[in-house]
Amino acid sequence: MSKVTLNSPAQEITGKAVVDSEYEKEVARMYDGKQEDFNLLLGKDTKLVHHHFGIGDFDRSPGALRDEDEIQRRLHELENAQTERLLDLLAGLGPEHRVFDGGSGRGGTAFMAHERLGCSVDGATISQYQREFAERSARERGCAAEVRFHFMNMLRTGLGTASMDAALTNETTMYVADLTALFREFARIVKPGGRYVFATWAIDESGSAGETIAAIDRHYACTMHTREAYLRALLDSGFVPYHVAQMDVDALPYWELRQRSEHSDTIEKLFIDGYHASSIAYLMVAAERVGG
Ligand SMILES: C[S@@+](CC[C@H](N)C(=O)[O-])C[C@H]1O[C@@H](n2cnc3c(N)ncnc32)[C@H](O)[C@@H]1O
C-alpha cells in the first residue's frame, strides 16, 4: 500500500492558512470548544465519538426508554446505524483502498470505515482539538498507521491528485459556502472511477424553509444548501450521482428520542418541525468520479 503524501503543503499552493476566513475561524473555534459535551457522553462505552445525527427508530411502547442511560444508549446506536448506512455506499472497498474523510470530527466515522472495510483513512478537520482527540483514539484502537488525522481544510487538502479511491463526508458539507469548490477538490483527489459518498441535511425546496432553516444555521454556525445545489455542484465538478436517497422518515425518530433526554435543548424541535413541514431533507448520496 503506498503512503499518502502531502505533495506540497496546501498553504503553499493556495496561499491560504488551514483556517483562513472569519467563517472558518468561527467553525474551528466552535469545534475546539466542544469537549466535555453530549457527543462524548454518547460514545463513552464504544469510544466512537460522533458529531452527526441518527438513523432508525426506537421502542415507543409505554414505559420503554424513559431512563436517561437507556435513551443515551439508543441514541448512540442510531448514530452508529447512520454511519453503517453511509458505509453501505462504500461496499467493495478493502484493505488496499484509501478513503478521504472530509470533516472527520473526533474520528467515529473514520474508525467505523476502517474496522468494517479494512481500508486506510485520512481524516481532515479544521479543529486542532479534534485532530488530537482522534489521533489519540487511533492509538488506543491500535490503528494509528491506517487511520490518520490531519489539521487540514477539505477545500484545499494538498493531497496528491488521484491519490484516493473514495472520499466521504458525514454531515460536514453545510460548513462550506461553495459546494462546487469543495466537490472540485474531491474530484481532483479521487481517482477516475472512484466514489464520493455523503450524508447531509439539506433544504427541501418544496417546503417553506424560512425561519426554521435560519435558526438551525445559527445554532450550528452552518450554511445549509438545497438538494438541487448538491446535485448541480456534483455534476459541475465531475461526479455523476447514481444513488440519491431522501431519508427523512428514518432521520426524524432520533430527534424525537433526543427530545426525551435531559440534555435536550431547542434544536430538537427545529428539526422535528422542519421534517414535518418538509423544509429539511436528509440525504445520502453516492456519486462516481467520471472522466480523466
Ligand atoms: C458536524 S461535524 C461532523 C464530524 C464527523 N464527520 C462525524 O460524523 O462525526 C463537522 C466537522 O466538519 C469539520 N469542518 C468544517 N469545515 C471544514 C473544512 N473546511 N475542512 C475540514 N473540516 C471542516 C469540523 O471541524 C467538524 O469536524
Image (cartoon, helix red, strand yellow):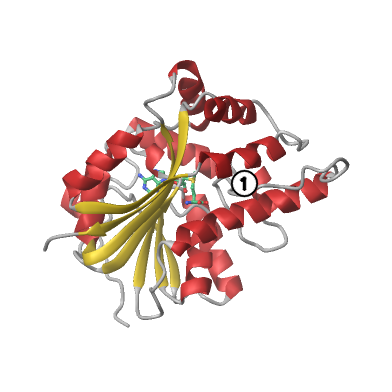
- Residue 281 coordinates in the image, percent (x, y): 45, 35
- Figure quadrant of the N terminus: bottom left
Q: Is residue 194 visible?
A: yes
Residue under the image location 20 percent in, 46 percent down: 235
- Residue 227 coordinates in the image, percent (x, y): 35, 36
Q: Which residue lies furthest to the left in this view?
A: 292
Q: What residue type is labelled 1?
A: Gln
Residue under the image location 60 percent in, 52 percent down: 79
Which residue matches tag 1?
35
The answer to whether residue 134 is above or below residue 70 is below
Relative placement, left or right, of 96 versus 80 is left
Near-viewer residue (144 or 43): 43
Relative placement, left or right, of 39 versus 16 is right
Q: Can residue 16 be seen in this view?
A: no
- Residue 250 coordinates in the image, percent (x, y): 57, 45
Relative placement, left or right, of 118 versus 21 is right
Near-viewer residue (139 or 184): 184
Near-viewer residue (74 or 57): 57
- Figure quadrant of the C terminus: bottom left
